[in-house]
Image (tube, helix red, strand yellow):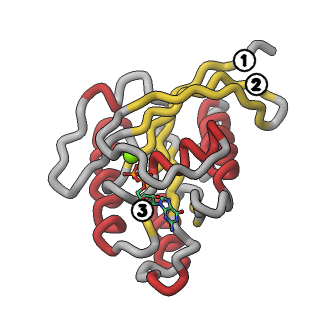
Amino acid sequence: MPPKERKIAFMGFRSVGKSSLIIQYVENQFVDSYDPTIENTFSKHTRVGGQEYDLHVVDTAGQDEYSIIPQSYFININGYVLVYSVNSEKSFEVVKHVYDKIVDMKGKMTVPIVLVGNKKDLRFERVISVEDGRKLAESWKVPFLEASAKENSSVKEIFDTILNTMRQKENGDTGE
Ligand code: GDP
Ligand code: MG
């Protein structure tokens, strides 16, 4: 089978670790101070479940609760990773706003989404529980993961999960 070309976007409030997660996955390193304004697209060849992918990952600068999301984040994007950080109540609110915007544009049952709570290494700064994240993801009927870009924990799983979710949806399995 030839590799499938797929494009995903990372979205969420600024400073939640979107760039850090992507760079940890693509370059296997944790960069401590990556320019937060850069909007870059990273590429990686990967294989999940016997299928090869040419994966393109759009790193957005970040949204807030007032953001109007540009059209370019909806066109030719096959899936979304929505990120908050477990030490930020605000980022948890923003991710709900971003979800609503995506679903308005793409439709609830069709768009592949994975919810990620990043910075799980910050045990003493945590304000969003695992249960809070899980409940939100359940209400959206999407997969949920907690991760740490810093400790390279569950980072590869994020990408495997979004690719698997995309494949299920493409095969007409709504997960219902
Ligand atoms: P972005 O604005 O969402 O792209 O966030 P960045 O990836 O630029 O990260 C923002 C800040 O959080 C940086 O100082 C990162 O080093 C830090 N950071 C990112 N991921 C983690 C993580 O998993 N754990 C901890 N402790 N810090 C992180
Ligand atoms: Mg960034």
Label 1 belongs to which residue?
A: 3
Question: Disc 1 or disc 3, which is closer to the eye?
Answer: 3
Residue drawn 20% across the image and 57% down it: 65
Give the alpha-carbon distance from disc 1 to disc 3, as whole Å: 31 Å
How crowded pointer 3 is (Cα within 10 Å; few <14, some 14-19, many 20+) is rated as: many
Residue type beneath disc 2: Glu
For residue 63, side relative to residue 119 (left or right): left
First-in-chain label (1 vs 2): 1
- Give the mark nearer the N terminus: 3 vs 2: 2
Question: Is the CB of mark 2 within 8 Å of ligand 1?
Answer: no
Percent of width and height locating residue 61: 32, 42
Name the amino acid type tagged 1. Pro
Horizontal side, residue 149 vs residue 72: left or right = right
Disc 3 marks a residue whose amino acid type is Tyr
Residue at mark 3: 84
- For the N terminus, which image quadrant? top right
From the viewer's perspective, is residue 91 above or below residue 172? below
From the viewer's side, name the closer residue of 174 and 29: 29
Q: Quadrant of ligand 1?
A: bottom left
- Is mark 1 in CB contact (under 8 Å) with mark 2? yes
Residue at figure coordinates x 32%, y 54% from the top left: 14
Q: Disc 1 or 3, which lies upstream in sequence?
A: 1
